[in-house]
Image (cartoon, rainbow, N blue to C red):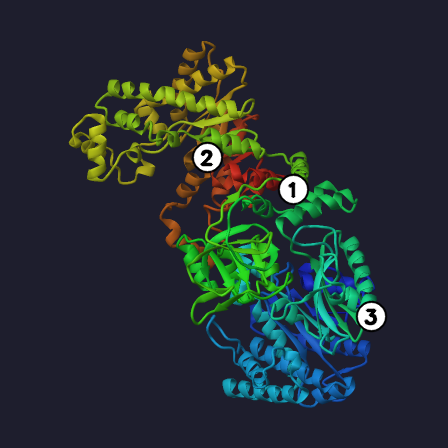
Amino acid sequence: MKRWVYFYGNGKSEGGNDKALLGGKGAGLSEMTSLGLPVPPGFIISTEACREYYSTGKFPDGLEDQVRAAMAEVEAAVGSRFGDPKSPLLVSVRSGGRVSMPGMMDTVLNLGLNAKTVEGLAAGTKNDRFAYDSYRRFVTMFGDVVLGLKAEGALEKDAFVEALENKKKKRGLRNDSELSAEELRELTAELQGIVLAKTKQAFPEDPWAQLFAAISAVFRSWNNTRAENYRRLNNIPAEWGTAVSVCTMVFGNMGEDSCTGVAFTRDPNTGEKRFFGEYLVNAQGEDVVAGIRTPDPINTSGGAAGTATLQGRMPGVYGQLDEVRHKLEKHYRDMQDIEFTVERGKLWILQCRNGKRSAPAAVRIAVEMVKEGIIDDRLAVTRVTPEQLDQLLHPAIDPNAKATVIAKGLPASPGAATGKIVLTADDAEARAKKGEAVILVRTETSPEDVHGMHFAKGVLTSRGGMTSHAAVVARGMGRPCVVGAGELSVDLRKRVVIARGQTYQEGDVITIDGSSGKVMLGAVPTIEAAGSADYQELMGWADKHRRLKVRANADTKTDAETARRFGAEGIGLCRTEHMFFDPTRILAVREMIVAADEAGRRAALAKILPMQRGDFEALFTAMAGLPVTIRLLDPPLHEFLPTEDRDIAAVAKELGVEPEVVRKRVVALHEQNPMLGLRGCRLGLVHPEIYEMQVQAIAEAALAVRAKGVDAHPEIMIPLVGTPEELARTRASATAVVAKVTGKGDTFSIGTMIEVPRAALLADRVAQHADFFSFGTNDLTQMTFGLSRDDSGSFLPLYVERGILKDEPFTVLDEDGVGQLVKLAVERGRTTKPGLKIGICGEHGGEPRSIDFCHRVGLDYVSCSPYRVPVARLAAAHAAIKRG
């Protein structure tokens, strides 16, 4: 019989630390047990069982028997029996994928309670109030998670929550903890009545029926909407499945000597090496992460008063927790996120995992751990993701800006964000998809809000602490976040936010600063983020380990200087057509297009020549000593001409011709499918004077800056080649122009952009005429898939959502199709020229997974937008360290 269940407890651990089998939570519980930490005994149902459940629609054979056997081991370990009316064993049933998905799947606590066992719990603990508080919590969670009674939608009332609030309202109470045992008994009965009314069935009394129903519900939660959204946003495979951890309950809600909390071995917001966390007295774990009550800090390191801290209230327990902190960080060699409960003065550890952290914290922790001798620089580089690096470079609030502060909360995730107020996750997604910048404002967030948090520029909540759901998830996403802004209240019914007595409508613009906790009215100016010393050190290690060079796509001096500042090793793509659109030269370009013959075109081009020469001089100067790849004119000429009668008349007046002359030229240039028409090298062959002018400008610019002592390295790229002969003829023309200008023959590197599938297939023959290849994967993707990048937005997202495509192919390089053409072209091109330099300059050049592919197929460099250069450098290092 296949094994599905693995026991842990009292120092015995059957499952080891296999996250793929036990899930992250289960592997952590198993490993902490082996380390001798105080972990409540339990057992883990494997991810394999989950996959089998989805395959067959039922529990796999043998699972229930193995669960019963494992429960017997737990009973022996703790001295209580599951379902025993006198000394009942209660358990939690929790999800756990192989990577952390905080709050996305479901949990049931206090399972095993019924009308008899609750009395046994009350008698055994001599605490009626605690017993019925636990019972009402169980009925609520089981009803929500297992029976599917959770309210859906932002405005739908939750019957369980409403019953609790009504009970408190009768006596004017603010906190659940003020309800008496009898009131909790009455409330529990009322909640069971809600279950009966809504499901037409009584709340289940049999603990074993409760347990197997909860296990099934946790399996099902792997495919709930919020979990699917989170997996899609974080590229987590759906086929992994979740494990289920069934763990002995320990109680933080047994009185003033009990508590529950979340702690991090270092500050997840700043990376500072200080024990950081929050806790709540007389509470269960969901109270902390839900943000319903504002927790207290565990120690005084953040400036809190000592009497309110765990360190001040329970110094012995805090000392034990601090020892656990050091032991876990030393063992895992990473910052740990620890969930703990204190039951009547005894510390229990319920979970540990690598803690989610802000981008600045990730960099600081990685660098400091190298200096502390915990990890080496290779591991440090992989500890910071390219996405985190991107977040690190986001703008910050300008310290000199004037701002009206309307509220202040806790700085939960750094960075500045400006947007319109939206009050629901669905509205955040809908408005963002229309191009609006939004700030999601909630009383507190829940896992159902994760899609809205993704689409929002920032997140703001009126309740919750630094370890609340909003803080943890926003930090992991890299969204600026402010939580616990108690001066602010959200009224969903009226669709308004009230702060310091002022009312703000949905759609009003605010700015939040996740580094200070300030909430400001309107758009507040920002400044470009500056890389810290830790950032510079980390990037030095990344550069040491990567093999791929990183260039930038840059068309202006400003872009080139920005790219150089971010560490670019040259320009991989200068799109000369972008220079043509400048208002000071578009008239000459249009004059060239409208010209009736070659002589007229050459006259117009003579006006453009000095402009282009100046452009290239600026780029060569900015990139002194580094290669600059210049793509000759690529788009069809019609893009430079107006289409409306008013605009045509204005151009005709500027050119001194009749409007009809311009109109006829526009009509003559019209193509049914211009992106597959007269463009790229085809344009250069039909009208060679255009490319001749550009090559002359490149050559003259190189000579001019060299005369000033600047080391210029131009590379001329010929676009849209589909046949070797196209490249051969265009190259010959360019070589002749260079020779004429320099008087030294062909001294420039001349290559081609591989963006037509036929060129990839004939790469061995194309390489005969090329000094380099550069893959233009935007067009190569269009032509390989046979779809338009501009028009496919209407269906590609649906393709990804339904699993027809794994990723949007214009975002992540399609390895199965486009990637095979790239691989083939690399192999065939280097068959002809073993030392052929090959790069990529499409949008994929800045995407981490695509960069990993480029490393694997042996490219020499990637090229991306200037602001993506650091991301590409780090991603290239990750690829080299991972792949060797």
Left or right of 831 in this view: 724: left
Residue with the mark numbered 1? 883
Q: Amino acid at mark 2?
A: Ala
Q: Residues under labels 1 and 2: Cα distance?
A: 25 Å
In x, y percent, where is residue 553? 48, 34
Q: Amino acid at mark 3?
A: Asn
Mark 2 Cα-neighbour bin, 10 Å: few <14, some 14–19, many ≥20: many
Amino acid at circle 1: Arg
Q: Classify mark 3: helix, strand or loop.
A: loop
Which residue is disc 3 drawn over? 10
Q: Viewed as shown, does residue 605 lie left or right of 499? A: left
Frontmost residue, 830 versus 376: 376
Disc 3 from disc 1: Cα separation: 40 Å
Q: Quadrant of residue 142?
A: bottom right
Chain-order first, disc 3 or disc 2: 3
Q: Is residue 296 above or below residue 767?
A: below
**514 left or right, relative to 369:** left
Residue 316 picture quarter: bottom right
Q: Position of residue 517 (x, y in %)?
A: 59, 56
How dense is the environment of label 3, judged by Cα within 10 Å: few (below 14), some, or many (20 and up)?
some
Residue 389 or residue 270, whichever sits in front:
270
| Quarter placement of the C terminus | top right
Could you say where residue 473 lies in the image, as x and y percent from the top left?
Answer: 59, 59
- The answer to which quarter of the image holds residue 382 is top right
- Picture layout, residue 199 above or below residue 730: below
